[in-house]
Amino acid sequence: MHMADALLSPAVGLTMCAVSASACVYATKKIKAENELEEQQIPLMGVGGALVFAAQMINFTIPLTGSSGHIGGGILLAVLLGPYPSFLTIVAVLVIQALFFADGGLLALGCNIFNMGVIPCLLIYPLLFAPIIKKGVNKHRLTTAAILSVVVSLQLGAFSVVMETLLSGVTALPFGTFITLMQPIHLAIGIVEGLITAAILVFVYQMRPEMLDIKLKGKNCGLSLKKVVAILAVITVMAGGALSLYASQNPDGLEWAIMGVTGSEQLIANDTVHKVSARIQQITAFLPDYSFKSQNGGTSISGIIGAAITCALAGGTALIIKHKRQRKNQS
Amino acid sequence: MRLVSGELIKLESLAEQDTFVHKCHPAIKIIVTFLFIIISVSGGRYQLASPIALLAYPWLLSTLSATPLKILHQRFIWALPFPVFAGIANLIFEQAPLYTLGGISISYGLVSLIVLVLKTYLTVIAVLLLLATTRWQDIFAVCERCHIPQIFCQTLTLIYRYLAVLTDEAWRMYHSYLLRAPRKKAIHFKDMGTFCGQLILRSFDRASRLYAAMKCRGWNSSSSVASKQPLVFSDLVYLFCSLCAVIVLTAIF
């Protein structure tokens, strides 16, 4: 689910960076204010982060499909470390993945932190996981809470990816088609990941119950189930209303997309999301009115050739420097 | 999985070199990299010239910093799948011709696919070049100077330091599992909970030992682990020249 820099416009990327930075500040303040973090927990956060990293490297076979996947770890860490420490740990993991493993990017860091950190650790854990096991930890509650939390986290994360990509205007995929592709795939992944997270938590609960009990027993974690259900109902009604408005304008995303394939360019011209993002990009684009630009919205052939020549010159210069350096080293 | 420790060592050894770029202040390199990424992704979906021209920057920088591009290109492939997926969608949905070259028409979709791949290349290589020319501790020092909370900085360092150890442990467990299950290519779904659970228990036990060892060596949660490098005039020259080069390239194309 890691987004790359190239999939984002600066406006969306920087806005999400600001949102995620605020979440980081909030989590840090909460840790300090509630004195939630003992010094002994800092190495646990380090190890927890490394563990999520290692767990993401281990692929497991998905039954009946012949394909494989890996776990995300947001909910798992939240149960082991608590919501705020786990959030900071996930942020640290994402920073390392972006810097060292080209998984995500610097500009996309804000989006990735929101999709994989804020949603599972700061929203789903206190609003869904904690209320389910509020009455006490047992195998059944752990399993139910883990599966539900992971599935909802992944669904919301996938929805965020769709919105962020569409608002950036880098893809011609219509909203309907994009969402139809993303949500079911992540539902399948979420169920498998949820089952694995549940199995891990049950295993840890059986072997070392104190590791979970510290975080969950006797602690007023999150809202009551009734309040959560009410909030979710309101969100569902609002989202349903907004989406139904959208659906009434564009009844079938796929048919609409096929119209674009026929060459009418309707897809580009009439897509509200792209219009809005194009407007934002026009405002934020760096030196948008540069020369060599052709009337058809692209770059003219002369511009491309000129750029290629510049690139070739730079490459040539690089080769000369390299050659000279090699000769210098030999002598 | 074993690649992780190898890759980290590779990048760390590259960052230890002694070129002009390596000597620059890390904060300046971070600023240049971030601005370069913003400029790279700012161009429109069909503006091909700008990303092609910007290729000059990472290629020159890799030469100046004696960083082999081959290593960076291997990492770039890891970042490709999702942008390519988005680009292929454009290829399908945007078939109207944008250019015609010798009777062959090039569609909007193909141009946007190429632009997307080029942007991915630029942004990924820029970040990797930053890491290949800057020591991890120096980036860490910049984080502390920017008042990023110490708890976060320490978590980051601990994860980074512990990563190789833990992935090695996971790798050993993974291999012993596969040796016990000869006809399986990966861990069976039903065993994943036990496998990861064992890894958690082992890791947290190790974390306790690690903590005890750190305390024995005088560590406490408020200790600073980074050294500070002063900003010199040549750093500002580097910032000015890099930004001018990128802005001029973008302005022309």
Image (cartoon, helix red, strand yellow):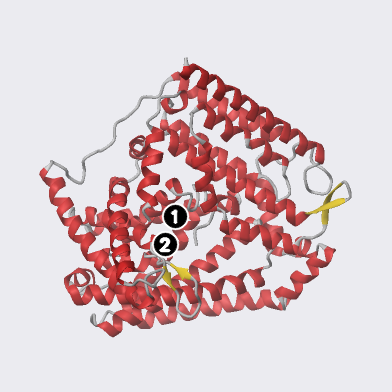
Q: In this view, does A299 lie to the left or right of B171?
A: right
Which of the 4 image quarters holds residue B153? top left
- Residue A209: where, in percent of width, then height? 18, 74
Q: Which residue is drawn at 70% across and 60% down?
A: B90
Residue B160 in view here = yes
Q: Residue at x 67, y 30 (%)?
A: B248
- Residue B209: where, in percent of width, then height? 15, 54
Which of the 4 image quarters holds residue B192? bottom left
Residue type, label 1: Ser
- Residue A25: where, in percent of width, then height? 37, 52
Quick check: B67 above or below B108? Answer: above
Marked residue chain, label 1 = A
Label 2 and label 1: CA atoms lie apart by: 8 Å
Circles 2 and 1: CB distance less than 8 Å? yes
- Residue B227: where, in percent of width, then height? 29, 31
On the image, numbered disc 2 is attached to which residue?
A118
On the image, numbered disc 1 is attached to which residue?
A20
Residue type, label 2: Val
Which of the 4 image quarters holds residue B135? top left
Q: What element carries label 1?
A: helix
Identify the disc placed on residue B129: none
Residue in the foreground of this view, choosing between A21 and B209:
B209
Quick check: A68 above or below B87? Answer: below
Q: In this view, does A82 lie to the left or right of A314?
A: left
